Image: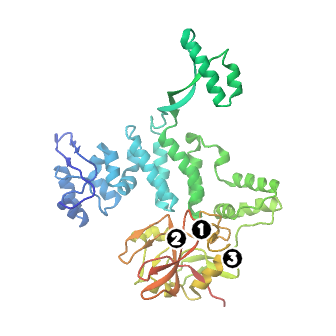
Amino acid sequence: MRESVWVCKEYMRTLSVKRSLYVVLFLAIGAFAQDSLHDAIDSGDLAAAKKMVKNGEIEEIYCGKMSANDAVSVYEKIFKQMPEQSFAACPNQFTYGYGTKVCANAKAVNACTEVVSFLLNDAVAGNTNALDMLDKVAKVALKTKGFNKPVKEKVDTTMWVACPKKGKAKEECLAQCIAQADSMYDVAHKLSCPAKPEHYVDTVVTVTKPSPLYEKLGTGLKEGYWKCPMNVAVKFANIMQANAKALAIPDTLIPSVKYVQRWAEQHKADSTALPGGQLFRFCTAWQPQVDSILASLELETRCPVFESFTDPRDNQVYKVKDINGVKWFVQNLNYAMEEGSMCYDRDDENCNAYGRLYTQAAAKTACPEGSRLATDEDWKMLEVYAGGASDAAVKLRSNGSDDYAFTAMFGGYANKNGISTTIGEGAYFWTEKADGDKRGTARSMFSTDKEVSSISVDSGFYLAVRCIMQAE
């Protein structure tokens, strides 16, 4: 048996061939499976894994690096009978392989809410697969009866409660009413005490709250539009629009061309500048209409103007923006090099969303002919132009004001062993500058911080690359 942070046991017995149902006893949640199950799944021997599960020979649910579809083929009956435990053991595979099915099960509201939360987190990080799955899951969940049922909850509180109607208790309560109103400087309540005596007491009340799933989905969609990378924001808006009625989201909160019209009119009336990040977010989705709205209101501001650069090696096209006289690629490089580059978690979908990650040696030669790696000096100039390194990230990151359409994406990094981390939270970019033996200088920024930091990084780590178009 392998060591584990979690300790659990799961006994399975086949009750009958007809019913093919499992009885599973969890003594504690989350342990590793038997070595044989680990080995079968890690080696891709799904037939052996299915056989062990069918015969009840496993001690826990283990998914390893299985695809979502493979995990469902091995564990589908367990996923159905134990959705919450299954999600805890295999959140990724369960969500993407079984999300729509669990959200069609009226008895699995908790597991469905976990799936929605997981997808919202992935979607906010820019995962387009998550947005596609979220769209499907939302449609199913909002049609499942019972999921919209409000939740009643007892809450400890302090409130004014009517005094007894007669006797000594009433007299004592009246005195309390006056004293408590005095202590709270509540003159109006003090004056009402003789006619309507009340005292302020600790009590328990029952409150009705919206369905946790509906609340999670509605709030997540409304906030996600503004937090996600701009290139996927319109998908958030579309999902919000499709489910607005069920989630009681008013039209005034749903980003659309009409929303942009109202937004621009309000700034015109208030004589305030259009926030660059919001404008760019709208332009990414509806540029021709946005420029028309701005022109009709006689506003000077327009959507950012981009040049394009086609990498002749693979024909990928990158947006280029002139920022203070320097033509920056405003997308991370996504050229696959034979040595020294990888996708986050070695998943091509992450490359599509965030570009590739490179070692410093690879980064120095990765940019296509006609461009070059942004240097340490280039970054210093950019930081100064954006208000100084201590505040520049707000104007440069994709979920900040992004005034210059630089759109720094939080694609994380990978260490020398390819272990990936901080996707959706951190952005890391190589420069050409060395920092001692086997280390290099890079820039980092985080999704919730203001500063752009200059950091020393092992040159074998994998970070993002921003190129600069060279003058002809």
Determine whether 136 is above or below 379 in the image.
Answer: above
Q: Are marks 3 and 2 in contact (CB under 8 Å)?
A: no
Element assignment for label 3: helix
Give the side of residue 179 with respect to residue 269, left or right: left
Residue 70 picture quarter = bottom left
Residue 307 visible to the viewer: no
Q: Could you tell me the amino acid type at mark 1?
A: Arg
Q: In the picture provided, is 388 more to the left or to the right than 105?
A: right
Q: Nearer the viewer, residue 86 or 142?
A: 86
The colour scheme of the drawn protein is: rainbow
Q: Where residue 269 appears, x then y in whole percent? A: 82, 53
User: Which amino acid, by three-letter code, is at mark 2?
Assistant: Ala
Q: Please tell me which of labels 1 and 3 falls first in the chain.
A: 3
Mark 2–mark 1 contact, CB under 8 Å?
yes
User: Is the Cβ of the residue at disc 1 closer than 8 Å to that at disc 3?
Assistant: no
Is any part of residue 66 visible from this angle?
yes
Callout 1 environment at 10 Å: few (<14), some (14 to 19), or many (20+)? Answer: many
The amino acid on which the numbered mark 3 sits, given as a three-letter code, is: Tyr
Figure quadrant of the N terminus? bottom left
Pick out the residue farthest to the top.
Answer: 167
Q: Which mark is residue 427?
A: 2
Q: Which residue is mark 1?
A: 397
Q: Residue furthest right?
A: 298
Where disc 2 sits, the SS reads strand
Crowd around label 2: few <14 · some 14–19 · many ≥20 (10 Å): many
Instruction: Name the residue tied to disc 3.
Output: 385
In the figure, 243 relative to 161: above or below? below
